[in-house]
Image: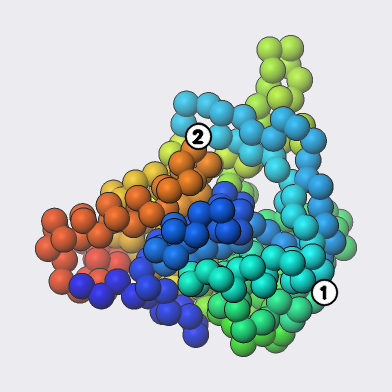
């Protein structure tokens, strides 16, 4: 069975990716990075960011709330110091880019369109400082504008990572498609607040993003909804902890999946998910990968 998946100009050898923000740059675990379909780097911004003050992670029975705050070395250092080291990896490399204005997204895409980079995941879930602090991802018009700017600056694969916070992702997926995106990733984390016993916020950044098994079934709903409504490939993420979770997302319409929170506990999780998914496909005697994608919608 051929597990290859093509998005834009990028051919992924298998459908399991390491999600942004949970696997660093993949340099600490090259065996994992080289065996899975690809890695999505932690978010890169134009200027370096120290991130939010600690504590940054709140654990609860169904997952975590994180408040890292886009900590990263910034564009200049990433391009000069980290990108050359990433050339040693055989993995497909998708760079997550986060801008605080439309112009910054364009600059990031233009500056990082090197031979080593296979594509970009456009993070439209960060504050839009130039437009009053709203989230890009909650406004379809802004999603289309950001996507179009990135598309104009690169011929690499363009993936837009969508939020489901107070917005129907079908509308923003349509906007991403109109702007020239090759695919969309959904869902990003959901807003969360954790309190201490005295009623004060636990996290140093006050609020954070919920991820892990607690959001899986909502994420599945979003993937199924978008995949059935919009003619654009979907990458599914949100609570994928094992091969069955991955198969569920693919059945709901995702072409690829991303493993995130599981990697924080076990850096080998993406590889284990891929091995389990492959075994499940053999056990179920699937012959054609295309027959698996979206089978949930076909059965309804």
**Cα–Cα span, label 1 and label 2:** 35 Å
Q: Residue at x 64, y 64 (%)?
A: 96
Please name whichever residue, 258 or 89, is drawn nearer the observer in this view of the structure.
89
Q: Which residue is mark 1?
A: 103
Q: Quadrant of residue 100?
A: bottom right
Residue 223 versus residue 151 in the image, above or below:
above
Residue 7 at x, y percent in the picture: 46, 78
Query: Against 24, is 207 above or below?
Result: above
Q: Which residue is mark 2?
A: 63
Q: Residue at x 61, y 54 (%)?
A: 24
Question: Helix, strand, or loop for circle 2?
Answer: strand
Which label sits on residue 235? none
Q: Position of residue 201 (x, y in %)?
A: 74, 25
Residue 219 appears in view = no
x and y, in percent, of residue 66 in the image: 64, 39
**Seen in the image, is 2 located left or right of residue 262?**
left
- Of the numbered discs 1 and 2, the one sitting upstream in the chain is 2
Q: Position of residue 81 (x, y in %)?
A: 74, 67
Question: Which residue is at a point 56% across and 62% down the rendered structure image?
Answer: 40
Q: How is the image coloured?
A: rainbow
Residue 101 image-quadrant placement = bottom right
**Residue displayed at 72% across by 30% down:** 55
Q: Which structural element holds mark 1?
A: helix
How dense is the environment of label 2, judged by Cα within 10 Å: few (below 14), some, or many (20 and up)?
Answer: some
Above or below, 154 relative to 37: below
Q: Nearer the viewer, residue 60 or 271?
A: 271
Where is 152 relative to 37, above or below? below
Q: Is residue 220 left or right of residue 59?
A: left
Q: How many marks?
A: 2
């Amino acid at each position: 069975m051929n597990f290859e998946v093509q998005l834009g100009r990028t051919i992924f050898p298998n459908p399991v990716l390491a999600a942004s923000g949970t696997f660093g740059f993949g340099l600490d675990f090259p065996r994992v990075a080289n065996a899975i379909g690809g890695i999505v780097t932690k978010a890169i911004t134009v200027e370096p960011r120290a991130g939010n003050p600690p504590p940054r992670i709140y654990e609860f029975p169904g997952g975590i709330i994180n408040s890292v705050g886009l900590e990263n070395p910034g564009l200049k250092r990433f391009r000069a110091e980290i990108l050359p080291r990433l050339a040693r990896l055989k993995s497909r490399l998708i760079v997550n880019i986060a801008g605080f204005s439309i112009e910054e997204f364009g600059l990031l895409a233009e500056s990082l369109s090197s031979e080593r980079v296979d594509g970009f995941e456009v993070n439209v879930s960060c504050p839009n400082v130039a437009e009053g602090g709203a989230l890009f991802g909650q406004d379809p018009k802004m999603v289309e504008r950001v996507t179009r700017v990135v598309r104009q600056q690169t011929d690499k694969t363009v993936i837009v990572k969508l939020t489901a916070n107070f917005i129907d992702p079908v509308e923003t997926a349509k906007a991403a498609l109109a702007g020239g995106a090759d695919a969309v990733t959904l869902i990003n984390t959901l807003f969360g607040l954790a309190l201490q016993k005295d009623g004060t916020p636990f996290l140093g950044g006050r609020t954070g993003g919920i991820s892990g098994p607690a959001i899986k079934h909502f994420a599945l709903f979003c993937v199924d909804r978008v995949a059935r409504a919009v003619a654009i490939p979907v990458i599914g993420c949100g609570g994928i902890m094992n091969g069955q979770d991955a198969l569920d997302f693919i059945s709901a319409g995702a072409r690829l999946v991303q493993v995130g929170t599981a990697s924080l506990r076990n850096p080998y999780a993406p590889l284990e998910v891929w091995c389990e998914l492959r075994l499940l496909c053999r056990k179920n005697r699937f012959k054609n990968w295309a027959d698996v994608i979206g089978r949930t919608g076909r059965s309804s």
